[in-house]
Amino acid sequence: MADKGLKRSLSDSDTSSDEDLPPSFSMGGVSKRSRLSIDEEVKSDSEGENGQSSSPASPSSPTSPTSPSDDHSNGMGDFGSSSTYSSAAQRMMKNMGYKAGKGLGKYGQGLVNPVEASKQRGRRGLGLRLEGLEASSNLKWDSSQEHIQVEEEVLWLPHCSDEVPDFETLMSWAREGPKKFEIADETIFCDPKILSGVLGGKNVFDQLDQRELQRSRSRSNPFETLGKLFFQNRAALKMANIDAVFDFMFTRPKNEAGEPLVGPDDLLYFADVCAAPGGFSEYVLWRRKTDSKGFCDAKGFGFTLRENDFKLHDFFAAPAEYFEPHYGKNGLDGDGDVYKPENITNFVEFVRKTTGGHGVHFMMADGGFSVEGQENIQEILSKQLYLCQFLVALGIVRVDGHFVCKLFDVFTPFSVGLIYLMYRSFKYVSIHKPNTSRPANSERYIICKWKKDGTEDVYKYLFEMNERIIGLSSTSMDILELVPVEDLQVDQEFFDYIYNSNNETGFRQMISLKKIQQFCQDTQLIEPRQSDLRHQCLEHWHLPDRSRTAPQRSEAKVKFTELTKGENYEYMSRVPEDLTVANLQEKLRSPYDYRCCLLAATRDGRKDRAFYLGLGGCNVFRWEGRGHATWMRVDTRLELPPDTLVYAELVTEHRGEHKAQRKLTTLHLIDGLILNGKDIRTLHIVERHKYLKKFATAVSKTSRPDLAPIRCKELYKSETLHEVLRPPRLSHRMMKGGPMPRRVFVQVEANSDREAHYTVPTGILFLKATKDPWMMAFSRSQNRKYWYHTITRESTFEYHPDVVAPFSSSYSGGAVWWWDAGVQVLETEEAAKGKLHFRDVMKHLAPPR
């Protein structure tokens, strides 16, 4: 019986005090009742029910619990009509204030109807109902409307043959007006139904828990499992997707004739703006290293908020040393705010100067910020970000270069006007949403191909507009149009493209939002095509399907053995022989067998001229080439990519004159063995130096005064050395703190606008280019060089690998002409007896007439 159970549960705690009991409720309010009185009441009722004095009531009895009249007589309503409740229980409920048809509680706030079956979803609270996201059979979602295509279609805007507008015309286009924070009425460049559908689809999810939304989105997106692969984030894979869809126009750029924009001796220069933590750049560096058979022939520049910096330590797929962040004004100490005009100007100047005035081959921009709660007006909130990214691109992208930038919605005249300016500044423009961009969001990308010449006025105009936006920021006014709407509508091809692009992207977004809605309603739904689409996409984008793993760290000695693959390194202990008057003829039998470079470390400075091993970042070690390979950490702060082994010297460079003279410690590369995993030991010394030049340019960071610069020494032909060792490059100059002029050599840098630097040369290093027993000679009858085998007496004009001296032969077979005191190099110097002088060496190296 129910009342017996009630009695038992209440009487189990008779020892509790009255103060511990919960209050009972009655019509008169809250009153305390002792547990004993309740027990006694229940007990008497129980005895009456089971004892002889009371007989069971018949169903037809007026006092029967099922009698309708009893509902009114006892005031218990439906509760009193149930045969499962005793009269004692009914009286208890009445005493606690229960009324028929009302809920329990002081204010009748308890449930009246039975508790429904749970429809709880995910982490939602019990009873929480979200309109549009509850289980429903009325939702109509047609899967055939979903657009799924591995080989994505690219639609280009027709080529614009009009001239780039001039500054005066551009300034007449701008229009100001009251600030606008509403997007629903922006229907000039899209179908009103599409805009309404997109906004309505987003609104459904406003109250949904973020984690529940993410789970539904992940389950419904056909391309979700692509993930980030072996890169640091999804953005890297997004750039890989875009690059592949557009025929690798970014990592393998070509001109209109189909010729590579990056020459065999050049680097691919790129910029990554507003794109921290750097996934785009990680992909580009990985792709270039992969395409170049292990050698990364690229250099990247980064520009982003300092507080949201690039995570270079997370570049597991590519070497971060080839990437140089910059933060605008004050360089490394800047804030990286792309809105600030002074930051834009400083970054543009830095990039153009570093690239020899040419600019980058392409720029990527992926800026964005949180707009939680304001998703529908993300485009309006991002307008200045759009403008500044476009502005930087026009400032640093070279002629025939490319540009890719993330956009969100493009419904407003301001955004469409920006696209129009790119349409006039580049030869081809496309608006594209890649598969890796989640279909339910507003994200899309503008791809601009082949920048036109003469876009300086557009850059100047956008710079002016950015300053005006900043000036209006504290007012109620804003820049609403960069190009008059009438002009945008007059260009029918442009208008139709934007209109159709917005409608197509918006329609697909509506379909995807509806799909997510259905997946929210039914947590058992899955997208069965995810695995197959992942495999097809990776194959189409030329990406290996492997997981992200952190690079293994090794000790210097272990890494050296690993890189040299167990090669006997005894030859590294045999330093190049000193040249003297006695051995000149024997050592340098043929001048054509050698290449040479100037040294700047002293004869006894072996700790500076040594083998340098890079393990990544500032983990650089040095071995002097004596005895066993004992690697010591380099005190000078410099960066080398991992898996790098070079022969180099630390030298002091000088700039300026007299008291204004400045010194700078620099690493000069003499020769290379392995560059970031690329083994170049068996190549000809000229080919090795081509790699070294690109390597030094890529990893040296001019914006980092805390790091020692890295340069590759100039390599000269021995027979042309007399043309180099003469004024004005080799001359005497007064040195700061010195009483006498010293012999100096002026280094020639690639960028002539930089201040020239000079070193105090200490000698000439001759490195063997021809492998023994071959030697190179000159045929007077053929007027050309040939190779001669000193043992078999075979001669050939044809180049073949057997004649090439690998690094081991170049190094151990080399020789040094030291410029000690008394050695005459310049005619104004005195020649000491018994020394090897300039005239002696030049006479021996002079080519035949």
Image: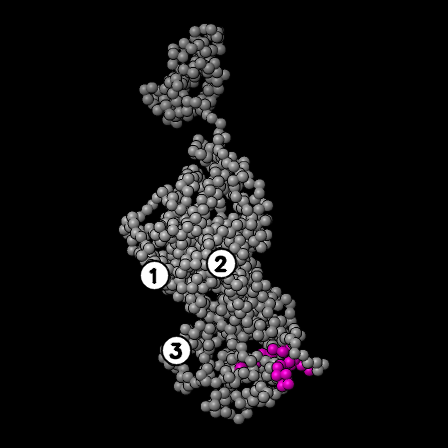
Looking at the picture, how far across and down is residue 170, in whole percent? 34, 58
For marks 2 and 3, give the CA distance.
37 Å
* Nearer-the-camera pick, 292 or 305: 292
Q: Are marks 2 and 1 in contact (CB under 8 Å)?
A: no
Q: Is residue 719 above or below residue 308?
A: below
Q: Is residue 109 visible in this depiction of the protein?
A: yes
- Image vertical order of residue 58 relative to residue 761, above or below: above
Mark 2 or 1, closer to the camera: 1
Mark 2: amino acid: Ser
In the picture of the structure, the residue carrying the numbered disc 2 is 281
Of residues 593 and 649, the one drawn nearer to the viewer in this rendering: 593
Secondary structure at badge 3 equals: loop
Q: Nearer the viewer, mark 1 or mark 3?
A: 1
Q: Residue at x 54, y 44 (%)?
A: 148
Q: Kindly identify the amino acid type of the residue bearing the numbered disc 1.
A: Phe
Q: Earlier in the sequence, mark 2 or mark 3?
A: 2
Residue 337 is covered by the magenta coloring: no
Instruction: Report the front residue among 613 and 278.
Output: 278
Q: Which mark is residue 167?
A: 1
Q: Which residues are magenta?
A: 764-790
Look at 63% across and 76% down and name the residue there: 805
Residue drawn 65% across the image and 71% down it: 568
Task: Give the residue pinned by disc 3.
Answer: 656
Say which label, 2 or 1, has the lower sequence index. Answer: 1
Task: Give amino acid for label 3.
Answer: Gly
